[in-house]
Amino acid sequence: MPRAILCILDSVGIGGAPDAAAYGDTGSNTFGHIAEHAAAGKADRAGLRSGPLNVPNLDALGIGAAIKLSTGTLPPNLSATPKGGRFGVGREVSKGKDTPSGHWEIAGVPVPFEWGYFPQTVPTFPDDLIADLIEKAELPGVLGNRHASGTEIIAELGEESIRTGKPIVYTSIDSVFQIAAHETHFGLDRLYRVCEIAFWMTSPLKIGRVIARPFIGEDAASFKRTGNRRDFAIAPPEPTLLDRNKAAGHQVFAIGKISDIYAGHGVTHKIKGTGLPQLFDKTLEALEMAADRAFVMTNFVDFDSEYGHRRDVPGYAAALEYFDARLPELIAKLKHDDLLILTADHGNDPTWQGTDHTREQIPILLFSPSVSQGEIGIRSTFADIGETIAHWLGLAPGRHGKSFL
Ligand SMILES: O=P(O)(O)O[C@H]1O[C@H](CO)[C@@H](O)[C@H]1O
Ligand SMILES: [Mn+2]
Ligand SMILES: [Mn+2]
């Protein structure tokens, strides 16, 4: 009874995308640079972690070997010889370096169109779009209206937002329209409604997502974003692996952000979770419920949202070590015909300039009690991951990518 478990370690890239120059990201390497910083004592934080990166379980599955294959260089304290599983590298054909592009392509559907983006101007959003939003959502106005880091703009404008009732609208280098507002002063349900209205206005512009960014706290020093983030995303242009497995009558567990990323399409069990520990727990729980030919997919967003975008090297290193320490629990739960794949959707090198994603290749670490050790090389599309899982679950081949099993 085959089952498949796909863990997306959001933003855990491994460097070296051949087209990185087009994104200003030549030389970025999320995992490799964290390992280098840690080895040099530059990822220490009192009370959190210190010293070289300690990820023996990821290393046993081939993370070091995958990075070496991707960049030609083995980072410190990692091994070039895995102890089990199959390792490889994924290269993205879709344009853009955001979450939906990566996830859709991983699920067998590369993005066939150019995403819409907002310019690096102030204001960034078209006047008519904002005027329309203010009118339809009955807002007293908006704040922000520029490119920004979400935590920084809340610290800067959060108090004014509470005082005036105006939500904060901002974007990034990604195809996103983000709206931050206070969970209770503005109201969470109201924020979601405003996002929904914005989504209908921005989707014709091929903006991938409108993201609700609720926060709590009463002043700049205490503002904190909550787990009630919600992404309103464009639906994938073709049926993904999730749709295909659901259509075959099998379970599809979507854990964390997964359901949002695929606009709810192809999901039979939507499971929310906040923070790495809970997302990991929910993944283990889903495995308990997963029947024959089930597909379990989890997005571990914190690597990206809490550490990558925040350019927090010690935090990112500690998160990798946490995930690594829990990996044996997941592996212990695998039955003979279960397939586990660990991968990422893009990079977000915390040592890089700015606060945006980085165009990188991704690790593909595959493990099953019934698959021998080996290497799968550099795959020319992330869609090979989806096709491998489709093959494993007995689905007909899709239009993009090839199974590596
Ligand atoms: O700075 P925050 O609000 O975390 O925004 C980040 O989150 C968005 C979605 O992943 C990205 O486009 C990036 O801008
Ligand atoms: Mn992502
Ligand atoms: Mn991100």
Image (spheres, rainbow, N blue to C red):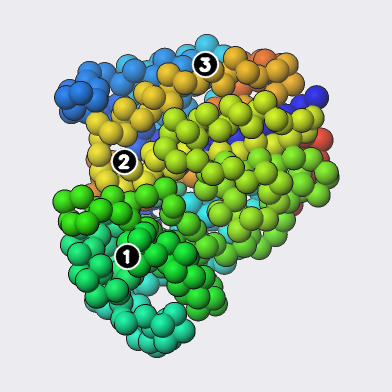
Instruction: Determine the CA span between mark 3 and mark 1.
Output: 43 Å
Q: Amino acid at mark 3?
A: Pro
Of pointers 3 and 2, the one earlier in the residue sequence: 2
Quadrant placement of the C terminus: top right
Instruction: Determine the CA span between mark 3 and mark 2.
Output: 23 Å
Quadrant placement of the N terminus: top right
Q: Residue at x 37, y 23 (%)?
A: 321
**Residue occupied by mark 3:** 328
Q: Is residue 81 visible?
A: yes
Left or right, 160 with reference to 303: left
Instruction: Determine the CA span between mark 1 and mark 2.
Output: 28 Å
**Residue occupied by mark 1:** 185
**Residue occupied by mark 2:** 307
- Using the image, determine if residue 302 lies above or below residue 201: above
Left or right, 322 with reference to 291: left
Q: Position of residue 338 (x, y in %)?
A: 70, 24
Q: Residue lying furthest top in this view? A: 83
Q: Nearer the viewer, mark 3 or mark 1?
A: 1
Q: Position of residue 322 (x, y in %)?
A: 39, 24
Q: Is residue 69 visible?
A: no
Q: Residue at x 38, y 87 (%)?
A: 131
